[in-house]
Image: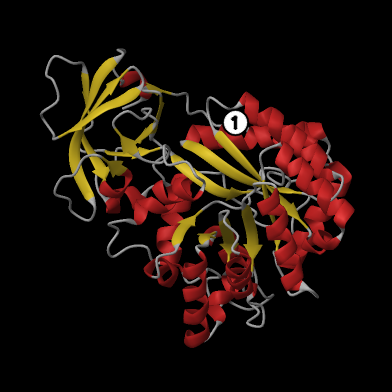
Amino acid sequence: MSFCDLPNAPHFVLANATLSAVTVEGFTAPAKEGLFSADLVIAEGKVESILAPGTAPAALPRVDLRDGMVWPCTVDMHTHLDKGHIWERRSNPDGSFIGALENVGADRAANWSADDVRARMEFSLKSAYAHGTKLIRTHLDSPVPQHRISYEVFAEVREAWKDKIELQAVSLLPLDLVLDETVFGDIVSVTKQHGGLLGGATRILPDFELILETLFKAASDNGLDVDLHVDETEDKQVLTLKTIAEIKLKTSFEGAVTVGHCCSLARQDDDLAKQTIDLVAKAGLSVVSLPMCNMYLQDRHAGRTPRWRGVTLFHELAAAGVKTAVASDNTRDPFYAYGDLDGVEVFRESVRILHLDHPLTDAARVVTTTPADILGRPDIGRIKAGLPADLILFSARRWSEFLSRPQADRIVMRNGMGIDRRLPDYRDLDPIMTK
């Protein structure tokens, strides 16, 4: 079935759909491994109702999905649209984290004009939209003066794409700049002007607690939330996650705080890991894991097979009540040589890397409802009467079918209509790939 097979009518039925219960609100039914059958009634671009299979009004046009799965459009809550697709002109020679830092820095200094950043952002968004993504949060490298260039481009792109993909931005700033009142003040001002969040990559620094307190105070004073890259290392000596939770509690910061990566948590002994997880839960932090990128970078040593997967203690965090999600992270840049901002790929690989299966009952939440909630958008990432019919239709009927193929034949619906899913051609980027 293609989107051309969808009823050409403002009011129709998607009959015999298989839904993941964790993504559905306002309707319940007996489920097997979190999946149940239903009819979806679509009217004027919205989900009008969710009904038991075979009970939708017979007079309405319909398409029989033959038990194919239907998902809400996905959420990608941690990406780097400003870095994306520079691999062809600036790769990572050894796949290491240091190699990634150095080569991104060199490319940023040499090439990141407004036109360059815009072209790569647009390419990424075209891909994400075709795959079925509706909400993206991107981190923007924010050393001075790059933050002004990137935020201006981001604002233009956000406006241009507002009817297709909702966009949020985080200032990814060198945290040692936080104590430079003039420089940090400028970054905060630009971030606030564009409705962004404050962020950065934490590491062991002199005055680290003071840096965090200053960051949280600036966020509080300006009504901003915080999203940090945390402990993206295999080094057991680095556990800034614990300090972040402690400082959030100490300062009574009321904004939302998201922490990404948290790799070294999985290297700690059980007692310290549990103590840290309890603090994270008490502080109300949300955690996003980036399984594909972290498996690529972490424990990479020349001539040696990796010994661990590079991801955080996802199950333990979730069991403690911490909001947990997964996301793409980098796309075809020195931090991750692959990827296409495809939420289905992120989900499929996360299931395998993080063992989100056996059972898969609630697994779909990690790229739908939970990241949408973390990003403050409870109207996205779920199927509910009254919400837009922004849906992804799959031929796969059960989890084994879904996870065994890339679902390249999926149909993406926006406002009840199928979209053109053709992906942008990499040749479109050729004009900016000169080194």
> Is residue 339 at all visible to an observer of this figure?
yes
Q: Which residue is mark 1?
A: 424
How many numbered markers are drawn?
A: 1
Observer-nearest of 61 and 336: 61
- Picture layout, residue 330 above or below residue 192: below
As drawn, is 24 to the left or to the right of 147? left
Q: Quadrant of the N terminus?
A: top left
Question: In which quadrant of the rendered view does residue 162 lie?
Answer: top right
User: Which corner quadrant of the image does residue 6 belong to?
Assistant: top left
308 lies above or below 55:
below
The x, y position of residue 116, in whole percent, is: 78, 35
The spot of residue 146 in percent (x, y) is 83, 44
Residue 227 horizontal/vertical position (percent): 62, 55
- Front position in the image: 104 or 405: 104
Q: Amino acid at mark 1?
A: Pro
Q: Residues within 10 Å of mark 1 (few under 14, many from 20)?
A: some
Note whether residue 429 is visible: no
Where does the C terminus fall, quadrant-wise?
top right
- Residue 433 at what x, y percent from top left? 78, 39
Secondary element type, mark 1: loop
The relative height of residue 66 versus residue 297 in the rendered view (above or below) is above
Observer-nearest of 160 and 259: 259
Residue drawn 59% across the image and 75% down it: 242
* Residue 332 placement, left or right of 434: left
Question: Left or right: 275 with respect to 30?
Answer: right
Residue at (75% x, 62% y) in the render: 214
